[in-house]
Image (tube, rainbow, N blue to C red):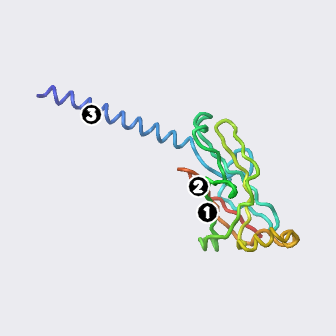
Amino acid sequence: MADSKRSVKPAVVRLVAAILLVAGANASRAADRELYFSKMAHDPLAATPIVYGPRDSIQLTLNLRTSSSADRARFPPLVIDHRLEPNVRFEVIEMRKGVEYLPASFRIDGQRDRQVDGPYQMADVWFLLGRSQPFYHIADHFGLLGRASDKHWEGTYRIRAFYREFSSPPIFVTVR
C-alpha cells in the first residue's frame, strides 16, 4: 500500500509539471505575437498623443508580428480597405479631458500598401477623423470643397485595431 502511494506522487508531479510546461510554451508563443501601430520600421507607438494639424494626413502602419515567417504565413493578409472584404476592425473613441466621450466618426482613407517582411505583416492606413460620413461623401464628390476644408475635426482620439484574436494597444491622436 505504501509503495502505491509513493508511485502515485511522482506520477502526479510529472503530470502537473507537463501541464505547466505546455501552459508556459503557449504563453510564450502568445507573447511572441502582437498587433500594434507604428509610424515606421516596426517601432510601436507609445501612449503619448501624436499631434497632427486639421489638414495633415494621418498615416499609420498597422503591424502584425509573429514568432516566425512560418507562423506569419498561417494568418491571412491584413485587409483594411472597405472596397474589399476587411478583416481588421477599428475602434475610434473621442476623448475629452482624458475620459472616453463618444465613439468618433472616422473613415479609412484607403489601404495604400501591404508588406510582408519575415515575421511581420504590415498595412499602411490613412485615417480621416471626427467628421460625419455625409461630409466625407460630399467632399469626395465636390473636389474643391474637399481640398478647401479641413480633413479632421479637432480633438483627441483613441484608436485601436482588432484582427482575429489580436487587439492593438490604444494609441492617441490629437488634431489641433
Q: Are marks 2 and 3 in contact (CB under 8 Å)?
A: no
Q: Residues within 10 Å of mark 2 (few under 14, many from 20)?
A: some
The residue depicted at 54 percent of the width and 43 percent of the height is: 31
Name the spot of residue 8 as percent of width and height, x first: 21, 31
Q: Is residue 110 above or below residue 24?
A: below
N-terminal-most mark, 2 or 1: 1
Residues at discs 2 and 1 in contact (Cβ within 8 Å): yes
Amino acid carrying label 2: it is: Phe
Dot 1 falls on a residue whose secondary structure is: strand
Mark 1 to mark 3 CA distance (whole Å) = 46 Å
> If you read the primary sequence from the N terminus, does the residue marked by circle 1 or circle 3 appear first?
3
Residue at 17% in and 30% down: 5
Q: What is the tally of numbered marks visible in this picture? A: 3
17 left or right, relative to 107: left
Q: Position of residue 111 (x, y in %)?
A: 73, 53
Residue at 72% across / 46% down in the picture?
A: 114
Question: What amino acid type is highlighted by mark number 3?
Answer: Val
Residue 37, numbered label: none
Mark in the foreground, 2 or 3 = 2
- Tell us which disc is closer to us: 1 or 3: 1
In this figure, which residue is indicated by the disc labeled 1? 91
Q: Which residue is mark 2?
A: 162
Q: Nearer the viewer, residue 19 or 49?
A: 19
Coordinates of residue 23 in the picture (x, y in percent): 42, 40
Which quarter shows the N terminus?
top left
Task: Name which quarter of the figure residue 141 lies in.
Answer: bottom right
Upstream in sequence: badge 2 or badge 3: 3
Kindly identify the amino acid type of the residue bearing the numbered disc 1: Glu
C-alpha span from label 2 to label 3: 40 Å
**What residue sits right under mark 3 in the picture?**
12
Q: Is residue 116 left or right of residue 26?
A: right
State the SS at label 2: strand
